[in-house]
Amino acid sequence: MIPTIFLALSLLICNNCKDIHPQPAISTNNACLFNVSQTIYHGYHKIAEVLEQNCTQSDGFDIALLDSTHVEQIFIAQESSILIKGEKEIPTIWSYAFLKFDNPPQNWTSDNIQDIIKDLFNNSISDARAGSIYYEMNHDNITYPGNITLPDHIQPSPEPIPEKKHNTKYIIIGVIVGFVIFILTAFAIFIVFRKSKIAYDPNDRRQLIKRGQYRST
């Protein structure tokens, strides 16, 4: 498969779309690092010039775009992974991009092609508003066209709600103390109620001997 990409600003892609790095990404020591600028006289002006260089690093090419705008048509047909990103943490904003996939992997279908492309451009933004990415997928002599709109800004990740910390030890102690107090209170009420019932039971035929009264013998 040879993807044809019309590049406007920044691009994240690799051969056969097997190893994709979302933007922003961090360069590693195992990649071939290159800077590309269309406004600086010396150095590389096109990504295609960089891809012509020999790279034997395991992480492939790590290409930094120094300009805020970069327009280039690229033909990619190689085995090395490719990472293209904005330099110095300056966000590179897409205007639009055209992707053409010839003979993609068999598991690429008209039903999942948009999800695959969205994964390629994960965390990317565009100022094109509508139709930032146009694509054509040629599969078994059938062309599947379409377009995807990237957001114009990255939504900040919601801060996780802090979990409520409970001190299990004190909770257990509180439950035990409360249970003991309940038992003691219930027992005291029972004793008082029992004594009251014995003293004033109307069915008790025994007569209390008053003080000063003598029994007959």
Image: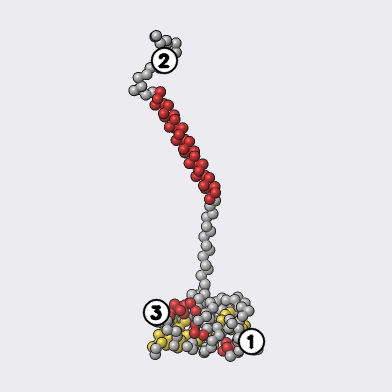
Q: Is residue 192 left or right of residue 91?
A: left
Give the CA separation, mark 2 to mark 3: 102 Å
Query: Disc 2 residue type?
Result: Ile
Mark 2 or mark 3: whose residue is earlier in sequence = 3
- Residue 111, labelled with which disc? 3
Query: Disc 1 residue type?
Result: Ile
Rendered residue at 49%/89% (across/down): 2
Mark 3 or mark 1: whose residue is earlier in sequence = 1
Q: Is residue 110 left or right of residue 5?
A: left
Report how many numbered discs are placed on residues in the image: 3
Rendered residue at 46%/80% (across/down): 117
Rendered residue at 53%/59% (across/down): 162
SS at badge 1: loop
User: Quadrant of residue 35 in the image?
Assistant: bottom right
Residue 84 seen:
no
Q: Position of residue 184 (x, y in %)?
A: 48, 36
Q: Position of residue 145 (x, y in %)?
A: 41, 85
Which numbered disc, 2 or 1, marks the residue closer to the eye? 2
Rendered position, 169 above or below 50: above
User: Quadrant of residue 110 in the image?
Assistant: bottom left
The residue to which callout 2 is attached is 209
Q: Quadrant of the C terminus?
A: top left
